[in-house]
Amino acid sequence: MLTVVVATRNRAAILRETLEAFRHLQEPASGWKLVIVDNGSTDETPAVLASFSNRLPLQAAYEPTGGKNSALNTGLGFVEGDLTVFTDDDTFPQTRWLVELRKAADAQPAYSIFGGAIVPRWEVPPPLWVQWLEQAPVYTLTDPTVNEGPIRPFLVFGPNMAIRSAVFQSGVRFEPSIGPQNASYAMGSETELTTRLNEQGHKSWYVPSAVVEHFIRDYQLRESWVLNRAIRYGRGRFRLDYMQVYRRYPSWFGVPRTFFRQIFEQEKTIIKAWLRSDQRELFCATWRRNFLWGHVVEARLSGRRRGA
């Protein structure tokens, strides 16, 4: 048996569509269970969950403490079976999703972490500049050219991730201080966990036949949203890399000095691109500048936390 765990907050409309997609899943031979954790919703989420209680093997839970990882940790308390699968409330699984994850987990006993393919479901046609971006950090999409086999842990993403339940039975939990919890946060919720597990000896396997579609909303195709996401991504990367990479770097006011030099270089690139009317380089250099600025923001915040 396996259990699917989903955290949700104030997304009743899209949650209803996601649960409808779950109704069309092919059931693994060993059976499955769905745990949805309401993370303090104030919309119609409870009513949506109640409406599917007799149409899915659904168990609803509630976690008032804000933060996706806090909700997922609550959901772990309701897991049954030997495999725990994670996805998001705006992700639509293809019919054989759970069957393929189950098959991979059974065929690869030496691996503890399994990541499936994530493809986009665009709300509106994407603008041209979307193809200039690295799709993983911006839209949480996987590389379609990757074949089945061993994979680095940071390439396993939250909308399509499975971990053997024994890992959590040993006491492992998500880190509540990282990941979605308000309008401004450090990205890297699942990456922090998979990287930590990798350091403990747990290996990751990629399953391209286990496919989900990640819903990309129209506002996520605005340049302002993408450039703000670069800051959140930069904050998360600093959190994840600090101990291994940046801890011993010379710093100014708690911020590694190398970031200021790199930001200055990107500012020069931005000016040159603007003078040449090179829209692609201008956009990409601005993304890189914001990504580095996220490092600066998180370095200052981390310094304050360590001081406290």
Image: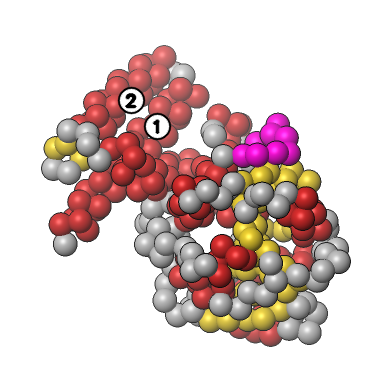
Q: Indicate the quadrant where residue 169 lies.
A: bottom right
Identify the main secondary structure in magenta. Answer: loop
Please provide percent x and percent y for residue 144: 70, 36
Residue at image position (38%, 38%) is 291
The residue located at (65%, 39%) in the rendering is 150
Question: Along the horizontal axis of the image, is 147 left or right of 9?
Answer: right
Question: Vertical placement of 200 versus 284: above or below?
Answer: below
**Residue identifier under label 2:** 266
Q: Residues within 10 Å of mark 2 (few under 14, many from 20)?
A: many
- State the SS at label 1: helix
* Marking on residue 50: none
Q: Tell me what residue is drawn at x 14 percent, y 37 percent.
A: 252
Q: CA distance from mark 1 to mark 2?
A: 7 Å
Residue 114 showing in the rendered view: yes
Camera-side residue of 53 and 3:
3
Q: Is residue 224 visible?
A: no
For mark 2, give the secondary structure: helix
Image location of residue 1, percent across then percent down? 75, 70
Q: Which residues are magenta?
A: 143-151
